[in-house]
Image (cartoon, rainbow, N blue to C red):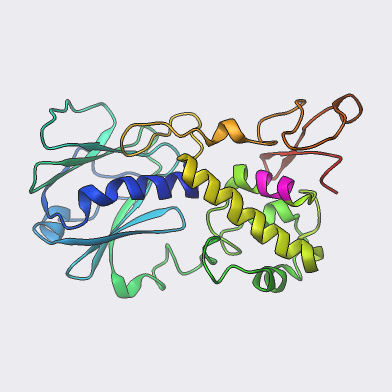
Amino acid sequence: MPELPEVETVMRGLLPVMVGNKIRTVKLHRKDLRIPFPLKMQEKLKNIEITALTRRAKYILVHFKDGKILAIHLGMSGRVLIVPPEDKYDLQKHDHMVIGFHDGAKVIYNDPRRFGMIFILNDDELETHKAFAHLGPEPLGNNFSSSYLKETLKNKKTSIKQALLDQRVVVGVGNIYACEALFMAGISPEMIAGDLKGKKAQLLVECIRDVLTRAIEAGGSTLKDFAHADGELGYFQHSFSVYNREKQACQGCNCDIDKTGGVQRITQSGRSTFYCPKKQK
């Protein structure tokens, strides 16, 4: 599943194509994804200038001059392709939406598993809409701090790893980056979330910010069938310290693999967790 860095990368890739442009056509090749496409979608969006692109959690938000917002969630396997004005394009099997712009460019939404979502809302609904009302702060925003994290987790009996995956606590960290941040901070993924105190809370916040920032700069973590808006693949996975490195030496750690057995994998709520048994206590 595309995580926050991948969605941020796609959003940034779409910026020069969409901002300042106007939609000419919207062609849908099925009625729905996880939810139905908006009714009369072309009529609602045609000829209105796109003023900005932003991201909230794992949603790409396309802002229009009239106050409408087109929200795009990539789901498990969604990807977005940019077709320049001068290029020809043959429709592919899972191309479910094709947006044509006045300058001749196209943006194509492709989703083999169809777990993505596309819907329209007004900008004054961004905090109250059911897709966003429950969401916690952005991990790279000012509202995500050690004091916030300690206060939010103080009574939680779940593991710290599971808490970081709770979108009500913080959005978009995801399984990969939770593993990596906990390794960087030297915190066991099985630690009770309510026990996060003092310097460890501050360190964890800093590590989450660091690993996400580096992943965005590297283009995201391309796993399975994810690709960027320009079709290029990310490569942050080559920098993983522990994720998907079971029984291998963890990068940046001086533990003795003969004694520890290398990176360990456990299952937490059905998700694989990778950690160093020496460094993370």
Please provide percent x and percent y for residue 204.
Answer: 70, 58
Residue in the image at 37% along x and 37% along y: 228
Tell me which residue sits at (78%, 51%) in the image.
Answer: 187
Residue sitting nearer the eye, 170 or 213: 213
Q: Is residue 197 at all visible to an observer of this figure? A: no
In percent of width and height, residue 179 lies at 68, 44
Quarter occupied by residue 21: bottom left
* Residue 190: image location, x then y, percent: 80, 50
Direction right: furthest residue: 259
Residue drawn at (37%, 31%), measured in percent from left and top?
A: 232
Relative to the observer, which residue lies in front, 11 or 192? 11
Image spot of residue 69 (x, y percent): 27, 63
Quadrant position of residue 109: top left
Task: Write down the region rendered in magenta.
Answer: 179-184
**Direction from residue 277 to residue 113 in the image, left or right:** left
Identify the residue at image location x=66%, y=36%: 243
Q: Is residue 17 left or right of residue 226?
A: left
How many discs mark residues in the rendered view? 0
Task: In the rendered view, tell whether residue 197 sits above or below residue 89.
Answer: below
